[in-house]
Image (cartoon, rainbow, N blue to C red):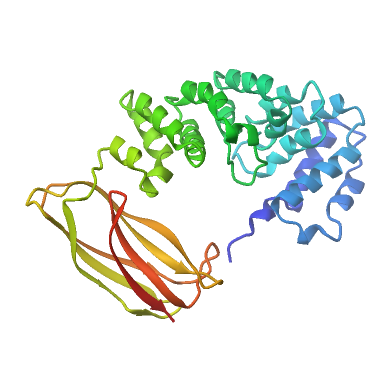
């Protein structure tokens, strides 16, 4: 069985933390601290609960003067970031939880994000003082350290997973744009991927905003072309006409499907097999195609919910294309399957062009 993610916070990490703190703060009560950390509720805590619990325990045994506590954290953080593990994010969490009113907090978060990531911790500061903190994020976007530059984008994502909401930026994303403009052609893929993810977040609430950015950025460089394409992935999967057109996917009026074949019944835990032929109606090459399939999954409430999956994308210079695919109903942690009727659809350039039904039993 794979190691539980929460176990990055383990006795080895806490012991390393204790040793490092003691080296620069001799009065640290390491025994009491570890006893407090590994209380009777420790095993039941999940990842972020463990992180916050360690922060709370640190506050009890670091100096009462928060400026001194911050200085200790600043010193020890550099010893925890070689592999960019998630465990050192406990330090930004400490700053987030206790430093919202402290004048040194944002400066410390900039330092800490070089060794872990302050993407979660910076968000309460944005909510509290958006204008001034967004100006700071713009300055971070010009940093010579790519971790800091990435945090400028990642920390301002409107829908960052596992993070607190940024309702004002979700409602009006324009303040994010100068940051993304600065980073869209960053030399580091790590940074550019964050820019694309930020765009993709924005697209879920403001598709026209993202389409406008995409039109302006496309063709500037290979880097920006990749950012635009990855940032528009949700719009493309949704079949958004403007997004599809932007990337050269014309409406599939010239296409037809023949010989759609699939298993009528699939056992729970088994595999759905299906195949089809895609044919040009006008005897011209099929052209630029984005092929997907969708499964309408039966849910616990008896209704269906659609999920779209990628097949292929590219230029087809023939008048016919044969496709064979499978989908496994083997149990996974991210999706629960239910017996009953399911739908199967073939999608070309964002448009459903054929559909069938099968039973999961």
Residue 314 quadrant:
top left
Residue 72 quadrant:
top right
Q: Residue at x 58, y 62 (%)?
A: 2
Camera-side residue of 313 and 77? 313
Screen quadrant of the C terminus = bottom left
Q: Residue at x 72, y 35 (%)?
A: 92
Q: Residue at x 80, y 57 (%)?
A: 42
Q: Is residue 10 left or right of residue 198?
A: right
Q: In the image, residue 293 lies at what x, y percent?
A: 33, 59
Residue 225 quadrant:
top left
* Image position of 15 with respect to 40: above or below: above
As drawn, the residue found furthest toward the left would be 283
Q: Is residue 24 left or right of residue 160?
A: right
Q: In the image, residue 233 lies at what x, y percent?
A: 40, 43
Residue 117 visible in the displayed image: no
Residue 329 visible in the displayed image: yes
* Image position of 328 with respect to 199: above or below: below
């Amino acid at each position: 069985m794979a190691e539980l993610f929460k176990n990055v916070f383990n006795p080895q990490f806490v012991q390393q933390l204790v040793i490092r703190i003691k080296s620069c703060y001799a009065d640290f009560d390491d025994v009491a601290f570890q006893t407090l950390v590994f209380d009777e509720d420790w095993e039941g805590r999940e990842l972020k609960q463990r992180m916050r619990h360690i922060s709370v325990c640190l506050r009890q045994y670091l100096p009462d003067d928060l400026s001194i506590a911050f200085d200790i954290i600043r010193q020890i953080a550099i010893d925890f970031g070689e592999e960019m593990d998630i465990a050192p994010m406990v330090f930004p969490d400490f700053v987030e939880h206790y430093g919202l009113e402290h004048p040194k907090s944002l400066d410390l978060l900039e330092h800490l994000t070089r060794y872990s990531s302050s993407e979660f911790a910076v968000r309460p500061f944005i909510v509290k003082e958006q204008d001034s903190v967004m100006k700071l994020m713009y300055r971070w976007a010009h940093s010579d350290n790519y971790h800091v530059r990435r945090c400028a984008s990642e920390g301002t994502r409107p829908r960052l997973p596992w993070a607190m909401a940024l309702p004002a930026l979700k409602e009006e994303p324009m303040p994010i744009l100068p940051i993304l403009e600065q980073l869209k052609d960053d030399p580091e893929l790590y940074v550019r991927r964050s820019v694309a993810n930020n765009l993709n977040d924005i697209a879920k609430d403001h598709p026209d905003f993202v389409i406008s950015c995409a039109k302006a950025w496309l063709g500037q460089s290979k880097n920006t072309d990749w950012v635009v394409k990855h940032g528009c992935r949700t719009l493309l999967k949704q079949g958004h006409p403007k997004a599809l057109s932007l990337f050269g996917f014309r409406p599939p009026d010239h296409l037809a499907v023949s010989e759609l074949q699939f298993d009528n019944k699939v056992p729970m835990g088994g595999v759905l097999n299906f195949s089809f032929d895609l044919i040009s109606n006008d005897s011209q090459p099929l052209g630029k195609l984005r092929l997907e399939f969708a499964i309408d999954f039966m849910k616990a409430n008896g209704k269906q919910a659609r999920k779209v999956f990628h097949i292929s994308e590219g230029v087809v210079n023939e008048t016919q294309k044969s496709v064979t695919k499978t989908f496994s109903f083997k149990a996974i942690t991210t999706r629960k399957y239910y017996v009953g009727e399911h739908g199967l659809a073939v999608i070309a350039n964002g448009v459903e062009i054929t559909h069938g039904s099968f039973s999961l039993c």
